[in-house]
Every structure is written in structure tokens, then in C-alpha cells.
């Protein structure tokens, strides 16, 4: 006998089982098909009718519930009783806009019974406190309102067909009552076009859903020629459900079914009728909100629906036979296929767990035997590759550890150098001199973004008086710190040349000195080497101060008034030289402030905007009467609160000072 492969063995056993099972199914199942067809069609018609009922119930019920909530709103009732109150009017607009957005077609109306005013809004008419018109009992077009006003029902629904838009419209009218008293009418209107589209889509062969009104007139049907709105003559006959039936007996059955469905609530009523020359089914369910009937027409000659419950006995017999066959088939497959594969699976799991010392031995001259040999070769290759990979990983790990140690050593050296640079930078800050000369008449906030930064402040005292100011060099971190040393040297050199009494002249000389210090190669490469500077000269025995700045303004407040003295528009070392002017300002009774752009540009708040001049000026006005120490704490607290979780973007410096003629000696 020729060698049988694994596939041949499986196909032979499976084909034998399936052929025998199909033979049994054909013999037993055919006897149940004919009887099961009608019962299956009946169950399907009931389910399909109930589904369509729920499709129309959901949107209408939702709109009714929303309309009732709108009419029962306390804000709506209060406004109807006091429509001339502007506060209630605004509250009503806000409340009504929420309902307007929630309604399906975004349309609403409300009538104030006391004034007769009619308000309406939809997608084309914006909601407002201006009524569309006033209702009148003498106007026949307004009779709907006055008839609804006399009813005691919780709501009223009417349906009409819009011939212009070719859509079915539903209007919901809900009386508004306050402690039992009728005060108005509210509601909404929406179209059923979405429902109609869903209702008519995905038609099943032999199954026709449609809707009729209480008189049996067809309102919705897949065949538009049968719809009442499309029938121009003899509407009651041609568009009626009774026109579809073949005989009087069927018409009587349908009338009885409609009456039964009306009294059965949401239950489906199904009857057999003669239609189109043969027997068909019609299922009805009553929809009281619209006074409609949802109908499903099943053509038994064309429908292909089958109720599985009818063939349950046949299926049971088939299952029993199939189980017996599968037991035999399973025993054969277990011996020929499953057992070897299970051994192979266990070996694969062993390899997956990390143990590669696996050897798989299976006898047989078939595919399983070939697979076992291939598996053993694969396991050997995995062992070899794994060992080689582990050796490479160990080598690479050693290299990475060595590189990491070198990087950490370099980082420690860099960190130590930066810490030392920070000490050097702090040493040029005139904290001791300012405390000695100025005492409580000044306060300073200095917060570099990194360990070192590009901001610093200056103080210089002579027989004429003293000079103080702040400097914001381009960049931050180490580059900014190096620039501070360069700018500080330029300031010291310029003070020796022109003194401190003329801040504008001093700024000009510092600018020239910086340009002479920087070589042409740096300028050509457009490296940022500019600096913002604000300087104030405070003369002895005088009641004024003199200010000049390069892109750093001076703010002042005496507790009541607020002023801002603008600086020159160009920074020192900018591509084009700037022009700087002195401004003599009053001393006594005034507090002055200078800040670098790191304070003003710091991002934060809900929208992550910069702190900004307006917020800074408000902070000055609110804190001008406090001591300088308290002001500095308030400024720093406000900045931290505004920053929140945002990181500091730039170096920050803020200088506050106030003097009078008695403390400048």
C-alpha cells in the first residue's frame, strides 16, 4: 500500500464523516422544511415589526421627554410669569439654548399665555427674547393653540406632511402649568426623515415593511406610488391597505387585526391574507403616540426565512449521529495526528521557557517524522545562536559599563566646574555693598535658570552718589554666564571713563566697549552677544533720580499713581547702535522697579501665556504700599503661582528700590 501522508489521512476520515452526515441531514431535514417555512416567517414578521416599532418609538419618546423637561423647567416657568425681567430673560435664553441644542432638529417654540406672544427658534432662526408674533383667538390659523389650551392631557402630538420639503413632520405640544394654572405652551418639531430612511433600507426579499394611519391610509411604503402623499386622486382607495388585498375576507381579517392591535398595547398581531393571488402574512403593532400602525407584509412564495426550532428534532438526531462519527474520527486522529503534535508542542514550550536541551523523537515515515527531524535541527540552531548571542551581550554590556563610567566621570567634572563658575559669578554680585549702602531701601530677586546664568545686577558708589542697575545678557547657562563677565568688565571700564552721573552716556560707552571687545568673526557669525541694561543714578543730597535703559524699562508708583519710563529700543551690542536718553524722576515717595524679560516672558496660567506687562503693572499697583521686602515676597509668590508646573524659561532678575532725600547721603 502506498504511503499515506498526514493530509491524506485527515481528508479521508473527514470526507467520509461529512458525506454520511450530509446524507442523514438531507433525508431527515427535508420533511420539516415546508412546515417550518410558515412558522419561521410568522416569527420573523413579529420580530421585524417589533424592531421597526422600536425604531420609531425611540426618537419620538426622546423628543417627548425633552419637551416635557423643557416645559417643566423652573427657569421657563419663572420667565413666563415675569417675561419683562431681564435677569430671568437671560437665564431663560441660557436654559432654552441647552434644550435647543439637544432637540433632534434643533427647533423649539413657546407661547406666553399671559401675553399671547409666540417665540420660535431653529437652525435658521436664532433664539432671542423677541417674539415672532402674537396669537389671537380671532385668527383661525391660531385655533390650534386655543384648542390645545383647553385640554388636560400632559402633551399632544400631531403629524403633518411638508409638501415643500417632502418630509414627515412631528410636532409635540406640552402645556406649561404652575401650581395647576396654565401659563403657556412649549414644545418642539422634528422630521422623521432619518427614521424613514432606516425603515426602508436593507430590504429583505419577500418582506415589505410599511406604516398606515388609523384609517388604514399608507403613510410610508417602499413603493412611493402607494404612499398617500404621492396619490393625487381617490386617495382613500389607492393609498389604503385594503386596496392591496384580494378579497373581502382578507379585508375583514385586517380590520379585526387593527382593532386587536390597538387594544393589545405594544404586542404584535399577525394574520394570513390573500394578496397578489397567493397566501401572505401581515403583522401589525399599534403606535399610540402618532396613532399609526407599523406593518410587515411577508410574501411566503418569495421569502427565504427558516425557523430553526422546526428542525430541532432533525438537528438532534444529526448531532447524535455526528457525535458517534466524531468519536470514531477523533480516535483515529488522536493516534495518527494529535499525539505526535502534542509531543511537538510540549518540546516547543520547553524551548520557549528557555531550556534548549530538547530532542524530539517520533517514529513514522510521514510528515510528522519529517517535522520531528526539522524540529531537532531548529533546536540545535537555537542553542548555538543563543550561546553566541549571550557572549556578544556580555561583551557589549562590558563596553557600555565602561562608557557609562567615563560619561559619569566627565559629568562630575563638568558639574564641579559649573558649581565653581557659579561661585565666581556670585562673587561679582554687589550684595554686600548694597546691604551696606542701601539697607532696607532695596530688594532684589535673582533667579538664574540654570546653576549659572546671563542676568546680574550692579552697584557703584562715588562721592557724587551711587549707581544701581540690572543686566540681561544674551543666552543663559554657561554662555550667558561668560557674557556677564564680559559685560561686567565693559561696565567697570566705562564707569572709570565717564563716571556714573550720566547713565545714557555710560550706556553708549558700554556699547562701544562691547563692540571693541568682540572680534569680527563673532559678529560675522551672528552670535548673540547683546545685553539689555537698565541703570539709575541716585545723586547725594538731591530729590531726584536719573534713569536710562537699553530695552529695560523703569516702573514707578507712589501708592496711587503708576508710571512707566520706556528704555531705548536697542540692546547693547545689537547689530545697530541704539540711542539712549536720561530721564530725571522724583525720588521721595516713589517706589521704582526694574525687571529683565525673564520675569515678563515666563509662561504659565491656564493658556500657557507669558506673565506680561499688564499683569506685572497690576502687581506693582496692588503692592506699592508694602515694604520692599514684603513686595519682593509677593512678586516671587505671584510668579511661582502663575508658573505652576511650567519650567523656568529664562534667567529672572527684579530690582526694587525707594529713597528720599534723607537717606541718600
Image (cartoon, helix red, strand yellow):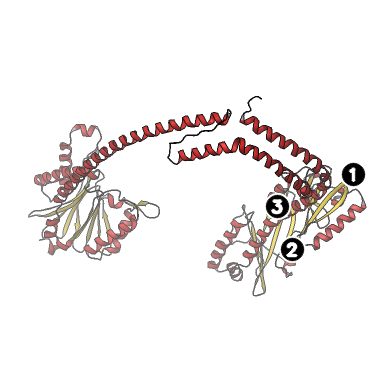
Residue 628, relative to residue 193: is it above or below? below
Q: Is residue 236 left or right of residue 142?
A: right
**Residue at the spot x=28%, y=36% of the render?**
399
Q: Are the residues flagged by discs 2 and 3 in contact, CB closer than 8 Å? A: no
What x and y, as percent, mark residue 535? 18, 51
Image vertical order of residue 663 relative to residue 405, above or below: below
2 and 1 marks in contact (CB < 8 Å): no
Residue 144: give its label: 2
Q: Nearer the viewer, residue 427 or 457?
A: 427
572 displayed left or right of 347:
left
Judging depth in this view, the residue of 29 and 616 nearest the camera is 29
Q: Say if residue 370 shows up in the picture.
A: yes
Residue most extreme to the top: 2
**Of label 2 and label 3, which has the lower sequence position?**
2
Label 2 Cα neighbours within 10 Å, binned few <14 / some 14-19 / many ≥20:
few
Which quarter of the rendered picture does the N terminus lie within? top right
Observer-side mark, 1 or 3, equals 1
Specify the farthest residue to the right: 248
How many angstroms separate mark 2 from mark 3 (CA)? Answer: 22 Å
Residue 277 is tagged as 1
Task: Look at mark 3 in the image and give the residue it sits on.
Answer: 192
Instruction: Report which quarter residue 156 is drawn in.
Output: bottom right
Please tell me which residue is depicted at 24% across the width and 45% down the height of the picture: 477
590 relative to 24, above or below: below
Residue 343 placed where, x, y %? 53, 38
| Image quarter of residue 515 | top left
Query: Residue 633 placed where, x, y %?
Result: 25, 61
Amino acid at each position: 500500500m502506498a504511503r499515506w501522508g498526514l493530509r491524506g489521512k485527515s481528508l479521508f476520515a473527514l470526507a467520509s464523516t461529512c458525506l454520511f452526515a450530509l446524507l442523514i441531514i438531507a433525508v431527515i431535514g427535508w420533511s420539516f422544511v415546508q412546515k417550518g417555512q410558515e412558522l419561521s416567517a410568522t416569527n420573523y414578521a413579529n420580530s421585524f415589526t417589533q424592531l421597526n416599532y422600536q425604531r420609531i418609538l425611540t426618537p419620538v419618546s426622546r423628543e417627548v421627554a425633552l419637551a416635557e423637561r423643557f416645559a417643566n423647567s423652573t427657569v421657563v416657568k419663572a420667565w413666563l410669569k415675569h417675561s419683562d425681567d431681564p435677569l430671568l430673560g437671560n437665564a431663560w435664553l441660557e436654559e432654552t439654548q441647552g434644550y435647543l441644542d439637544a432637540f433632534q432638529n434643533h427647533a423649539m417654540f413657546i407661547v406666553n399665555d399671559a401675553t399671547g406672544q409666540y417665540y420660535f427658534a431653529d437652525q435658521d432662526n436664532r433664539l432671542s427674547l423677541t417674539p415672532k408674533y402674537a396669537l389671537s383667538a380671532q385668527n383661525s390659523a391660531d385655533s390650534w393653540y386655543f384648542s390645545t389650551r383647553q385640554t388636560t392631557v400632559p402633551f399632544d402630538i400631531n403629524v403633518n406632511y411638508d409638501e415643500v420639503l417632502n418630509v414627515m413632520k412631528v410636532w409635540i405640544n406640552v402645556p406649561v402649568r404652575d401650581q395647576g394654572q396654565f401659563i403657556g405652551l412649549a414644545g418642539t418639531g422634528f422630521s422623521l426623515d432619518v427614521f424613514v430612511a432606516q425603515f426602508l433600507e436593507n430590504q429583505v426579499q419577500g418582506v415589505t415593511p410599511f406604516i398606515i394611519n388609523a384609517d388604514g391610509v399608507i403613510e410610508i411604503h417602499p413603493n412611493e406610488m402607494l404612499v398617500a402623499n404621492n396619490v393625487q386622486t381617490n386617495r382613500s382607495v389607492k393609498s389604503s391597505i385594503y386596496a392591496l388585498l384580494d378579497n373581502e375576507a382578507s379585508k375583514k381579517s385586517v380590520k379585526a387585526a387593527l382593532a386587536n392591535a390597538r387594544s393589545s398595547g405594544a404586542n404584535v398581531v399577525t394574520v394570513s391574507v390573500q394578496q397578489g393571488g397567493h397566501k401572505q402574512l401581515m403583522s401589525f403593532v399599534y403606535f399610540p403616540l402618532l396613532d399609526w400602525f407599523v406593518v410587515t407584509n411577508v410574501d411566503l412564495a418569495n421569502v427565504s426565512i427558516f425557523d430553526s426550532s422546526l428542525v430541532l428534532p432533525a438537528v438532534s438526531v444529526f448531532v447524535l449521529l455526528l457525535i458517534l462519527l466524531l468519536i470514531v474520527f477523533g480516535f483515529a486522529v488522536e493516534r495518527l495526528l494529535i499525539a505526535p503534535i502534542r509531543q511537538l508542542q510540549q518540546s516547543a514550550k520547553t524551548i520557549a521557557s528557555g531550556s534548549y536541551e530538547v530532542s524530539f523523537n517520533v517514529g513514522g515515515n510521514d510528515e510528522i517524522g519529517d517535522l520531528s527531524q526539522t524540529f531537532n535541527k531548529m533546536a540545535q540552531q537555537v542553542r548555538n545562536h543563543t550561546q553566541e548571542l549571550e557572549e556578544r551581550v556580555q561583551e557589549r554590556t562590558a563596553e557600555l559599563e565602561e562608557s557609562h563610567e567615563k560619561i559619569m566621570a566627565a559629568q562630575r567634572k563638568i558639574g564641579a566646574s559649573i558649581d565653581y563658575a557659579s561661585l565666581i559669578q556670585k562673587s561679582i554680585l554687589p550684595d554686600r555693598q548694597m546691604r551696606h549702602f542701601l539697607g532696607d531701601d532695596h530688594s532684589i530677586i535673582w533667579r538664574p535658570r540654570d546653576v549659572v546664568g546671563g542676568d546680574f545686577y550692579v552697584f557703584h558708589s562715588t562721592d557724587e552718589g551711587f549707581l544701581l542697575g540690572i543686566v540681561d545678557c544674551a543666552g543663559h547657562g554657561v554662555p550667558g554666564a561668560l557674557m556677564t563677565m564680559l559685560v561686567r568688565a565693559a561696565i567697570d571700564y566705562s564707569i572709570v571713563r565717564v563716571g556714573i552721573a550720566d547713565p545714557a552716556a555710560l550706556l553708549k560707552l558700554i556699547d562701544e566697549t562691547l563692540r571693541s571687545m568682540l572680534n569680527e568673526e563673532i559678529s560675522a557669525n551672528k552670535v548673540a552677544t547683546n545685553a539689555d541694561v537698565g541703570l539709575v543714578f541716585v545723586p547725594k543730597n538731591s530729590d531726584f533720580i536719573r534713569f536710562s535703559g537699553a530695552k529695560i524699562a523703569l516702573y514707578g508708583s507712589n501708592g496711587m499713581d503708576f508710571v512707566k519710563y520706556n528704555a531705548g529700543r536697542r540692546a547693547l551690542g545689537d547689530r545697530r547702535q541704539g540711542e539712549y536718553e536720561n530721564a530725571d524722576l522724583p525720588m521721595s515717595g516713589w517706589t521704582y522697579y526694574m525687571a529683565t524679560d525673564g520675569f515678563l516672558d515666563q509662561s504659565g496660567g491656564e493658556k500657557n501665556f507669558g506673565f506680561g506687562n499688564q499683569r506685572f503693572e497690576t502687581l506693582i499697583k496692588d503692592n506699592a504700599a508694602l515694604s520692599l521686602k514684603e513686595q519682593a515676597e509677593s512678586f516671587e509668590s505671584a510668579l511661582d503661582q502663575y508658573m505652576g508646573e511650567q519650567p523656568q524659561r529664562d534667567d529672572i532678575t527684579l530690582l526694587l528700590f525707594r529713597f528720599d532725600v534723607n537717606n541718600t547721603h
